[in-house]
Amino acid sequence: MEEFQYKVALITGAGSGIGRETAKMFAKYGAQVVVSDQDETSGQGTVNMIRELGGKSTFIKCNVAVEAEVQELISKTVKEYGRLDCVFNNAGIEGKSQTINECTRESWDTTVSVDLTGVWLCMKYEIEVMQKFGGGKIVNCSSIAGIIGFENLSPYVASKHGIIGLTKTAALEFAKKGIRINAVCPGVIETPMLRRFTQGDVESMAKEVPMGRIGQPNEIAETVIWLCSDKSSYITGQAIIIDGGWTSK
Ligand code: NAD
């Protein structure tokens, strides 16, 4: 895709799983990629992979739940590359597995501050910059947990539902300003998060997927890239489900 040549793409939570794969794919399609993560070692690992493949990439450490760090991430990106065209707000945590009444205030706040507030904070500062440069594309990472309920994951499920509401609202607010804002809703995807969640027994989840298999991170990355490309030029405010049929059950 020639259209990503000279474009700048920022991916949060890009040190692992879906974020890493998306960062690599943006680089493959010619974008200059800002890899961000709260974990410096894994984030730098993604940058090294991109550079080995001949791509251009920089690591910027950021905890998306901390406003000052998000502000600095965006200002450093613009300082280094002079613009910001595409963003994948992907950083997220699964939180503790607990029923609503077992969930403590601390554990609620920890998950919501990363998974929901983090996406809001990122959009707040990304949109400021994109407006100055005349537009941009934002993709937020929700989940099928943003469409249906999952037992024992209330802060995660509430955050992922909230991301879809935020995405629709932001899309309306900036539709006339050249900023398209969408969300992706992955099903069960083979990443370290899924391995933690299933305690290594990923295959037991595969049985529950209508397509009979776990999804791969590149299957999410392809959709993110498409949503950031001009091929999806009339799409904004949507939550695209990529789940092998799970939510059709
Ligand atoms: P992962 O755990 O492999 O990667 C998540 C990355 O986010 C890690 O590199 C981690 O260091 C980073 N991160 C965590 N908290 C952060 C913070 N506060 N600030 C910055 N970075 C932070 O997980 P994944 O499966 O690749 O998940 C990526 C996104 O996809 C998440 O938003 C997750 O909720 C969503 N998702 C995943 C699945 C799945 O089955 N894997 C399904 C639906 C949605």
Image: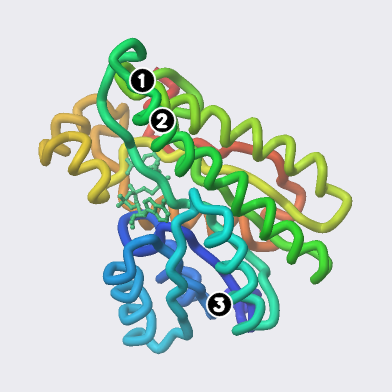
- Point out residue 181 in the picture as x, y percentages from the top left corner: 68, 48
How packed mark 3 is, by other alpha carbons closer than 10 Å (few <14, some 14-19, many 20 or more), is many
Left or right of residue 45, residue 244 in this image = right
* Residue underneath mark 1: 150
221 shown above or below 94:
below
Dot 3 falls on a residue whose secondary structure is loop
- Point out residue 39 in the picture as x, y percentages from the top left corner: 32, 63
Q: Amino acid at mark 1?
A: Phe
Q: Residue furthest right?
A: 176
* Residue underneath mark 2: 156
**Could you say which is closer to the camera, residue 136 or residue 59?**
59
Dot 1 falls on a residue whose secondary structure is loop
Dot 2 falls on a residue whose secondary structure is helix
Find residue 145 and report its image quarter: top left
Dot 1 beta carbon under 8 Å from ligand 1: no
Cα gap from disc 1 to disc 2, whole angstroms: 9 Å
Dot 2 beta carbon under 8 Å from ligand 1: yes
Cα gap from disc 1 to disc 3, whole angstroms: 36 Å
What residue is drawn where x is 62% and y is 67%? Answer: 74
> Which sits earlier in the primary sequence, circle 1 or circle 2?
1
Q: Are marks 1 and 2 in contact (CB under 8 Å)?
A: yes
> Which sits earlier in the primary sequence, circle 2 or circle 3?
3
What residue is drawn where x is 49% and y is 31%? Answer: 159
What residue is drawn where x is 76% and y is 55%? Answer: 179
Left or right of residue 139, residue 151 in this image = left
Q: Amino acid at mark 2?
A: Tyr
The quadrant the C terminus occupies is top left
Residue 21 visible from this viewpoint: no
**Could you say which is closer to the camera, residue 126 or residue 243?**
126
* Residue underneath mark 3: 31
